[in-house]
Amino acid sequence: MDVEEFARDFLQDVLAESDADGQFVEDVFFQKSCEQLMEAGELDAADRVPYRAPARGIRVDGYGGDPVEAAGTLNLIVLDFQPAQEIGRLTGTEMDAAFRRLSNYLRQALDERWRDALEETSPAFGLADLIGQRWQSIAKIRFLLVSNRELSERVDGRSAADIEGRTVTYSVWDIRRLHAQATEGYGREDIEIDLEEDFGGALPILPAQQSEVDHQSYLAIVPGEVLAEIYDRWGARLLEQNVRVFLQARGKVNRGIRITLENEPSMFFAYNNGITATAEEVDIANDGGQLLLRGLRNFQIVNGGQTTASIHVAKLRKLDLSRTFVQMKLSVVTPDKATELVPRISEYANSQNRVSAADFFANHPFHVRIEGFSRRIHAPSPDGTFRQSKWFYERARGQYADARANLTDAQRKKFDLENPRKQLFTKTDLAKFLNVWEQRPHEVSLGAQKNFAAFARRIGQAWRKSPDDFNEAWYRVAVAKAIVFKSTERIVSDQPWYQGGYRANIVAYTIAKLAHDVSDLNRAVDFEAIWRQQLPGSTLDDAVAIAAARVHGVLVEPPAGISNVTEWAKKQACWERVRNLDIAWPDAFIAGLISAEEQRNTARTARRDQRELNGIEAQIAVVNAGAQFWLDALEWGKARRLLTPTEAGILNAATRVPARTPSDKQSSKAIEILAKLHSEGYPKELTASS
């Protein structure tokens, strides 16, 4: 997909979602573009704060979360959105004007009289008050301009500035850069680290493994000061995407690391496990037999993010790092192998922290199964026609666009009817739809990435305990919850008391409150009915409208000492207050609920059906793999003494296909044994053509 097609599709996505969900177009543009910035590592969070005062040259559109949680960096965002089919040109003069408006907002936010003149419940006041409260702890400022136009080629950058002693840097994400991030995963410039020129000199390095053409490994000792300076320059972009998401949900800096840096810096090397890192390219010189690491390209820390961030915080606090050293295991991975190898290195390196694959990767069996349901299961037609549609689950970025890419016009029209864009949902969407029903609105309010990290850990644990819980009935309930979520968004936007702002928080807390009170009644929402109708129904809509008004009142009246509503919504205390609300639910809504026992019975039946289906699928997989595949696995396992007699017998039974097919239980066990061998390094994967 070229940039012109991407721009048209991106605009249509924004306009369609705006129309379907009753949102302002710029709100949707902010949400969609900032999701890409978070995936790229430019931001850890993105909260919408629209404020304009054109006469005074002031504008802000959002910020990147609490500066305290971003190592003292204040990220402010301004938009440039043009609803035109053709890509426009963003000139240097227009870029400068956008950044100037953002700078004016920041300067005004530091003026207490200006802050106090704002409406206290407005997002602009909340952000200004947060800036005022955090100003002493803010070390750096980043201005980000996000545009669906293309930045003029004549603009090659913008020099850093200064506001009251804080360095201000500038970043522009135009449509070409958004396109690169969305389609290739490289929307940001390469990370080029020149140790000799910029960081005090080359580092001694030892080769550890050079046997693979596409993968070499080295060991090095990195001075704490150097690691802190590198992180200071590139920040969270150094943390491989999945690890970064994981760390965001883990919260504050590790206490043990901090104590060591403060009290025993010379013992840091002995106490700490160090970091595991990758790079696409390294510059290594040989100085009289001593190898020296002079530079790295696209350096990524896949394990040791807490270590790195803690050392950076110590630098900001002026602690002496001259005696702090960190061991580094560095793998050099070529770009064409990075997609395959870096996630594995990340997963295995983090195993010491008991981080499951579900915390990280889109190819976990949970996501694969949900994707399979979404491609196979048709939703009932809500309008009485014979045309059925599907809810398209995008477990990996770009799947929807890829599915449409090579179709003819007629095929694409058919695809769009069967897979309407309004029924497309991603992993982070699914996490949001489900976590509100788990009564975690404060987690959902943290933002898509952090919420997904928490969701992934819980799903990973649940999957290990009982994968059969995730069946077709579970999928239908998940889609029903998506329908309720989207309906609640429209309902909130239509309320007379809604003046814009905080809609995402209101929606999350409204549904969570409904889930809590229904559970207290020992009842359940009839999600199967919602699935059949593809609508929540008027009684549920009425209940949502009542609850939303009450929730809104709690959100916009935070307790003393908290002025920022967005930050208030991220706190457990906010959920406690909403949970304790006494809401008089309509009688018709209560009458439409089903019993909790009926819901449990449905889940038990679905679990049994999934177990039977798993056995059938396992048999098919065993037969399709072929006798030679299972013979190879059997011999490999025997040679390494990894198989018990029972396991060897089951694999031996599989070697007799297709003349004799193992039972469904034997087939399931064979696949479990294969997974065991994979964990020990067996290279052959199970495919239909194995």
Image: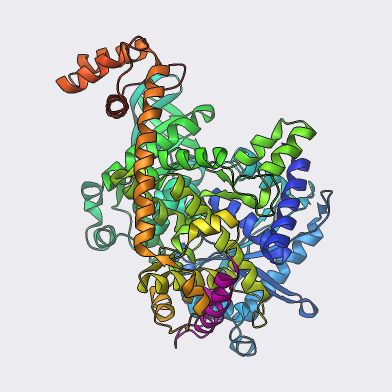
Residue that lies at the very extreme toward the left in this rendered image: 645
Q: Is residue 279 left or right of residue 672?
A: right
**Magenta segment:** 537-566
Tell me where residue 221 sits by quadrant.
Answer: top left
Task: Work out whether residue 430 or residue 24 is closer to the camera in this orientation and state it.
Answer: 430
Predominant secondary structure in magenta? helix
> Which quadrant, please, contains the N terminus?
top right
Q: Is residue 120 left or right of residue 587?
A: right
Q: Is residue 615 left or right of residue 644?
A: right
Q: Position of residue 340 (x, y in %)?
A: 47, 31
Question: Can residue 602 be seen in this snapshot?
Answer: yes
Q: Is residue 334 above or below residue 37?
A: above
Tell me where residue 316 sits by quadrant.
Answer: bottom left
Check residue 567 for magenta coloring: no
Q: Is residue 349 above or below residue 150?
A: above
Q: Position of residue 136 (x, y in %)?
A: 47, 76
Residue in the picture at 39% in, 17% down: 623
